[in-house]
Image (cartoon, grey):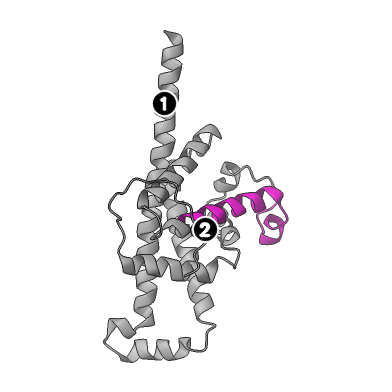
Amino acid sequence: MGGPRLHRMGTCISRRKRHNEMTAAEIEAIHDSWMRVRTKEIGKQILRKLIARKPKFAEYFAIVTESMEPKDLNSNRQFLLQAHRIQGFLDTAVGALGHCPIDSVYDLARRIGQIHFYRGVNFGADNWLIFKRVAVEEIVRVGEDERAKTPSYGDLLASALTTSSPTASCLDDICIAHVAWSKFMTVIVREMKRGFLEEAMRNCKDVESSDI
């Protein structure tokens, strides 16, 4: 697969090697589904759904607009910027997955968490969970919508309804993609939270040292 941005650049951002928490089949499912959605403005779709699910996310991302209707959001520069950042981050993370040590993904996510600290963006545990769920739901949904447009999809669906073999079932493919993205986003969110907390602790120590 001609992977997304980071793989094309041939650059891994970590030389450490830790055990990958994902199987080869899960990594393949993530790559396949991402290639279907990355040209479909998935960053916008994730951010729109986040705001629809919880309007407070507009404030977290400093999006000021008269309404949260899609047409108004799509003409809002801050919305477009944040959607671009979400998609760019996921594009780079997926590009690293399976091609670079898993710590490359961990390091990338932790850096985003550190950036959130300095920008004063503290989601809280419930909001991290919402972000994870929305990202997984939208990526899997859009990916399957795109796959449904292919001529072979009808045959796969018919096979899924008549066969007992999981390898022949497109419904099982959907399940694998959902599980894979859920695991991947769990890792991403965990490391982003860790980066945020590490930076907060480091900042507290610096303040304490300056007071001595």
Is label 1 in a helix, a strand or a loop? helix
Q: Where is residue 162 in the image (x, y as percent from the top left)?
A: 32, 92
Is label 2 in a helix, a strand or a loop? helix
Q: Which residue is drawn at 43% across and 29% down?
A: 200
Q: Where is residue 75 in the image (x, y as percent from the top left)?
A: 73, 56
Decide: few, some or many residues near mark 2? Use Cα within 10 Å; few <14, some 14-19, many ≥20. Answer: many
Residue 88 colored in magenta in the image = yes
Q: Mark 1 points at which residue?
A: 202
Q: Nearer the viewer, residue 123 or 200?
A: 200
Q: Where is residue 143 in the image (x, y as percent from the top left)?
A: 49, 72
Residue type for callout 2: Asp
Quarter of the C terminus within the rendering? top left
Residue type for callout 1: Arg
Q: Where is residue 58 in the image (x, y as percent from the top left)?
A: 60, 47
Badge number at residue 91: 2
- Is the residue under label 1 in contact with that under label 2 (CB below 8 Å)? no
Q: In this view, does 34 lie above or below 200?
A: below
- From the viewer's perspective, tell me whether residue 136 is left or right of residue 17: right
Q: Is residue 33 above or below residue 164?
A: above
Q: Is the magenta stretch mostly helix, strand or loop?
A: helix
